[in-house]
Amino acid sequence: MGDGMVHGVCLRDGKALWYRNRYVNSSRIAAARGTAEPLGRNWNNSSVGPNTNVGGFAGKTWAMVEAGGCPVELTYELDTVGYNDFGGTLPGAFSAHPKVDPNTGEMHAMTYAWGQWLNHVQYVRVGRDGRVNRTVDIPLPGMSMVHDVSITEKYVVVYDQPVIVDFDLAFAGRFPFRWKPEYGNRVGLLPREGEASDIVWVDVPIGYVFHPMNAYDTADGKVVLDVCFYDVMMEKDILGPFGDTLPRFVRWQVDPVRRTTNATDIDTRVNEFPRHRGSLTGKPYRYGYCAQVDTGSMYWPTVKHDLVTGMRDVFDHGAGRAAGEPVFVARPGGSEEDDGWLVTFVHDGNDNSAEFAVIDAQDFSRGYVARVKLPQRVPFGFHGNWVPDR
């Protein structure tokens, strides 16, 4: 994993105003360019800048990474402002995958950092004002790779999984994660205002989850977790994620009273980069969206799941064309859950070009609602978000 580069398209009044790509400035980028290092303090002193996710919160644009790196604030035009520890309130590491509560507007993250923290992760809550207002240190039996987090209206969900930090690899300067199935796999249900001692731990099937789709509480006290699940991760290929097994779409129904989990497959085909309507984060929902990744070809369609009927709809981007993470953008004033658009970058392997694509989330048969041809290829990346001006 190297330095991060952010790509952005600005849309206004039905037109694409600009496309930009910018490196997230870091000490390594600055040294290569002979320019000043980014302002602010990077908590883990890494020479590499955030390279995993970019999004908006508290009126700012943020580039983010896990495992200790401090988020970097970007300008509207995607240039680096500098490291920002939420106004001096972030005590340590942050995450690439925070979740925003649609009820409160607060941002929730589960953070970890090897070298600095050896046996715990930290839950971080950031208020709408962009300042950290709550942290909880959560002891773990080892340093597992906690890539993401889920929230429900009652709980924050900790994923304590059997991909762990191997310090021999880390000290040798290699990618530090490895598969350790004997570590076990479990989720922790932290009450939203509780402490570490209040967490209910429940075993789940051995495997690994990079990305949950969503989570919610049920009327009978259970917790539903919809996840993209790998049976094995980083056993043969320590760089992951597709070198060992491919992810399927799975539902876990977790019972915090009996401390049991009922696991069922939603879709056994390959599903990754799951998204849903953001206003339903932590709540019951019907529709989810994924990229259907095919590691053997450049054919990555976009999939819509109806979690009530079990039906799925597939948007075919064409032979040799691969779509990335499908981000849902709600139609202003719309009343139905899927009333909106999916936006994504599409790579065309036939001519090595790229475009920004807009799809009607309710009606895939319409084809593209809009396509913005980009002046250069957008490399395969991880995550992005829609950030409205207002």
Image (cartoon, rainbow, N blue to C red):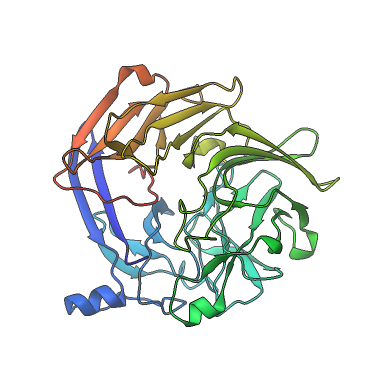
Asked if residue 196 is positioned above or below residue 153 in the image, the reply reads below
Whether residue 11 sits left or right of residue 341 in the image: it is: left
Residue 171 image point, x, y percent: 49, 82
- Looking at the rendered image, the quarter that the N terminus falls into is bottom left
Whether residue 272 sits left or right of residue 159 in the image: it is: left
Residue farthest along the bottom direction in this orientation: 171
Asked if residue 269 is positioned above or below residue 211 in the image, the reply reads above
Pick the front one: 42 or 73: 42
Looking at the rendered structure, the number of numbered marks drawn on it comes to: 0
Pick the front one: 159 or 59: 159
Residue farthest along the right direction in this orientation: 258
Residue 192 image point, x, y percent: 69, 53
Residue 262 image point, x, y percent: 75, 39
Q: In the image, what residue occupies the spot 44% across and 69% down?
A: 70
Q: In the image, what residue occupies the spot 69% across and 56% down?
A: 185
Residue 144 position by quadrant: bottom right
Asked if residue 236 is positioned above or below residue 90 in the image, the reply reads above
Q: In the image, what residue occupies the spot 44% across and 75% down?
A: 174
Residue 103 image point, x, y percent: 59, 42
Residue 148 seen in the current view: yes
- Looking at the rendered image, the quarter that the C terminus falls into is top left
Whether residue 137 sits left or right of residue 147 in the image: it is: right
Residue 331 seen in the current view: no
